[in-house]
Image (spheres, rainbow, N blue to C red):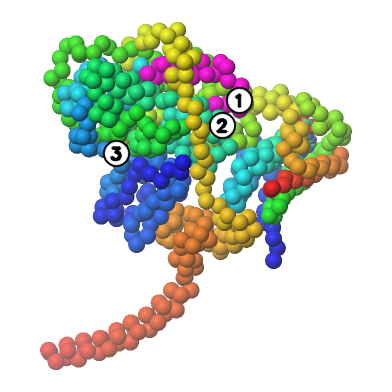
């Protein structure tokens, strides 16, 4: 028997009105599983920031949540412009957000650093012109 | 402490199983079984929406009646400032307090002035605070319970300051003990409440063991007796007129506008509060200092135990604020000194009371969640409610938790119905043939 619970979500770029829906759903799943609230919060921040990056910078993405008794894994795979310089992009404060996005309170350049900070393992890969793939792992214990 | 008190109850005699409460309950805490509503108390947050909705008056607020306080030597009414907005548009707060004394309370104490003091205390708290932001107002018991159940992460955001009703009751008791040499237990402080949820915060006061209040009576329960005596109170009431920004507290935005602090928000209505809490949990809104949150969209004037239309009541409050609200009722410096002496502080912690997970063992919980998704996939997703649960999703939840069985879904049993109805139809046809023959025979004989 497969020990993990898996659910796939899709996000489309520019869809600001649905922004945050997926991280809300992920949180509901974790709360039903009785996951400790500190962990829920860390996953919430990481998934929300990745979801928002898709909305702001990519065309669309598939988000896969996988929870087994030990770890929570979230894979965000988008089709979009990709990231040319990952090291630069990971720096706190680095952002290419437009003034309009900043008006909405985004674009502090803290998204990726916060995703990394809130995960126990984090990998980011990108193909310029194709898309970006994040893998976020949070340990349950 | 996990509280097991709910401020509403269901009168099974009056309930006719119409499902209105089940459909509208914002936390899906109502089920219908054997044509009667019942409450899943762990999910209920005492919002009173069902009290408002039920046409059969089958959902009863568990507030007190006046006679329950006869054990006290001295009774003090502590009316929510909402009370001031329920009568004529020129009704004066002081006159309304006098009316409460006429209808049987030994005294009545205003809560608008303590509200102004609490505003000053909040302002002071914001000045020196550097914990997680934004801070959330603690005064709506339903919001507090929502956070305890669904957003335990946000408990640290709730401002640890005593509520105006508690401060009013504390002061009133202190004064009367001194004046009449009575002991604390001989004086009853009774809140006149716009909503049932205040009962919750009297029985299980946040961050402390005992409330200074001894119970609450619904505004709607004393309304008519207060109205009757109002015309007899002429000219000057015994008390001085009530002043201050606290008068605006019962309307949406009232707390924030009394605060004189930047970057504050007011949110009314459970859905919008939930959306904001989701955002805060996601790490947003850190530049906001303070959020005034109300379960009712129109704030306390829209409570389920009020009489006046909430928008008209709002208008009356605004008029009162215009007249009496510009002049403060407290010396700010004095209140600040009280604040420094921790007069407003609540040192205790708020404990979470999260919804039961599908299973305490995570491996089992994962399997149950998978099963639940599977069941949900089989259900019609019409949320028809015939099974007695508000949505297919909550029904799937009930099945997994052993509270319901899948065959209670009419669409899953439709196959059974087909065979049963086929049999029924055949036997009906047989009978009908017999009956017709008998009928024809009978007719012939008559002719
Ligand atoms: N999925 C993505 N696709 C393309 N570019 C991205 C993606 N995610 C992030 N970026 C780039 O990385 C920058 C930094 O992202 P982030 O740390 O989330 O901060 P912010 O979103 O505030 O700009 C963004 O401004 C953007 O240029
Ligand atoms: Mg970002």
For label 1, count other residues whose C-alpha is less than 10 Å away and answer few (under 14), some (14-19) or many (20+): few
**Mark seen at residue B63:** 3
Q: Give the structural element (helix, strand or loop) at label 1.
A: loop
| Left or right side of B438 for B397 | right
Q: Chain of mark 2?
A: B
Could you tell me how far apart the alpha carbons at marks 2 and 3 are, in whole angstroms?
30 Å
| Left or right side of A64 for B144 | left
Q: Chain of mark 1?
A: B
- State the extent of the magenta-drawn residues as a range: B114-137
Query: Closer to the N terminus: mark 2 or mark 3?
Result: 3
Could you tell me how far apart the alpha carbons at marks 1 and 2 are, in whole angstroms?
8 Å
- Residue B254 in which image quadrant: top left
Quadrant that contains the C terminus of chain B: bottom left
Q: Are marks 2 and 3 on the same chain?
A: yes
Instruction: Answer whether labels 1 and 2 touch (C-beta < 8 Å).
Output: yes
Residue annotated with mark 1 = B131
Q: Is mark 3 within 8 Å of ligand 2?
A: no
- Residue A4 in which image quadrant: bottom right
Residue drawn at the location 59% of the way across and 50% of the way down: A34
**Mark seen at residue B213:** none
Instruction: Indicate the position of residue B369 as horizontal and vertical percent values.
Output: 60, 57
Residue drawn at the location 86% of the way across and 39% of the way down: A128
| Left or right side of B87 for A76 | right
Could you tell me how far apart the alpha carbons at marks 1 and 3 are, in whole angstroms?
36 Å
Q: Indicate yes or no whether the magenta region holds residue B242.
A: no
Main SS category, magenta section: helix
Q: Chain of mark 3?
A: B
Q: Give the structural element (helix, strand or loop) at label 3.
A: loop
Q: Indicate yes or no whether the magenta region holds residue B136.
A: yes
Instruction: Indicate the position of residue B354 as horizontal and vertical percent values.
Output: 52, 45
For label 2, count other residues whose C-alpha is less than 10 Å away and answer few (under 14), some (14-19) or many (20+): some
Residue drawn at the location 17% of the way across and 88% of the way down: B443
């Amino acid at each position: 028997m497969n020990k993990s619970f898996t659910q796939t979500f899709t996000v489309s770029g520019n869809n600001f009105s649905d922004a945050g829906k997926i991280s809300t759903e992920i949180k509901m799943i974790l709360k039903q599983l009785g996951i400790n609230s500190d962990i829920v919060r860390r996953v919430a921040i990481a998934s929300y920031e990745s979801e928002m990056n898709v909305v702001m910078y990519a065309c669309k993405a598939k988000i896969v949540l996988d929870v087994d008794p030990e770890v929570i894994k979230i894979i965000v795979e988008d089709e979009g412009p990709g990231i040319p310089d990952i090291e630069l992009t990971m720096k706190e404060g680095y952002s290419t957000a437009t003034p309009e996005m900043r008006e909405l309170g985004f674009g502090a350049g803290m998204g990726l650093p916060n995703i990394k900070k809130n995960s126990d393992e984090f990998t980011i890969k990108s193909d310029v012109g194709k898309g970006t793939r994040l893998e976020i792992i949070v340990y349950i214990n | 402490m996990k509280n097991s008190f709910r401020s509403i109850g269901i009168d099974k005699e009056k309930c006719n199983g119409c499902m209105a409460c089940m459909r509208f309950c914002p936390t899906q805490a109502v089920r219908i079984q054997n044509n009667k509503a019942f409450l899943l108390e762990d999910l209920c947050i005492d919002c009173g929406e069902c009290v408002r909705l039920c046409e059969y008056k089958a959902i009863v607020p568990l507030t007190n009646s006046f006679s329950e306080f006869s054990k006290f030597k001295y009774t003090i009414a502590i009316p929510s400032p909402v009370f001031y907005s329920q009568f004529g548009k020129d009704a004066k707060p002081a006159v309304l307090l006098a009316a409460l004394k006429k209808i049987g309370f030994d005294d009545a104490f205003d809560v608008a002035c303590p509200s102004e003091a609490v505003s000053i205390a909040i302002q002071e708290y914001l000045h020196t605070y550097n914990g997680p932001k934004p801070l959330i107002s603690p005064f709506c018991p339903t919001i507090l319970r929502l956070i305890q159940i669904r957003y335990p992460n946000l408990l640290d955001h709730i401002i640890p300051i005593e509520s105006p009703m508690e401060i009013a009751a504390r002061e009133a008791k202190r004064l009367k003990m001194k004046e009449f040499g009575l002991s604390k237990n001989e004086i009853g402080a009774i809140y006149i409440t716009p909503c049932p949820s205040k009962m919750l915060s009297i029985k299980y006061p946040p961050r402390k063991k005992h409330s200074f209040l001894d119970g609450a009576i619904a505004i709607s329960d004393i309304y008519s007796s207060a109205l009757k005596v109002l015309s007899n109170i002429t000219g000057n009431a015994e008390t001085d007129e009530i002043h201050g920004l606290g008068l605006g507290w019962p309307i949406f935005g009232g707390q924030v506008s009394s605060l004189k602090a930047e970057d504050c928000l007011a949110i009314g209505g459970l859905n919008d509060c939930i959306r904001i809490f989701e955002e805060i949990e996601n790490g947003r809104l850190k530049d906001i200092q303070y959020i005034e949150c109300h379960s009712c969209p129109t704030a306390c004037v829209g409570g389920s135990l009020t009489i006046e239309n909430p928008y008209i009541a709002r208008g009356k409050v605004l008029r009162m604020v215009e007249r009496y609200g510009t002049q403060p009722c407290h010396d700010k410096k004095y209140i600040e000194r009280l604040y420094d002496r921790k007069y407003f502080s609540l040192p205790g912690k708020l404990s979470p009371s999260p919804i039961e997970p599908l299973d305490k063992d995570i491996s089992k919980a994962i399997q149950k969640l998978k099963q639940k998704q599977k069941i949900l996939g089989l259900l019609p997703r019409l949320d028809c409610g015939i099974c007695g649960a508000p949505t297919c999703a909550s029904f799937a939840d009930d099945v997994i938790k052993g509270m319901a069985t899948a065959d209670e879904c009419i669409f899953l049993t439709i196959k059974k119905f087909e065979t049963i109805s086929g049999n029924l139809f055949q036997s009906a046809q047989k009978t009908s043939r017999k009956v017709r023959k008998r009928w024809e025979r009978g007719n012939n004989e008559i002719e």
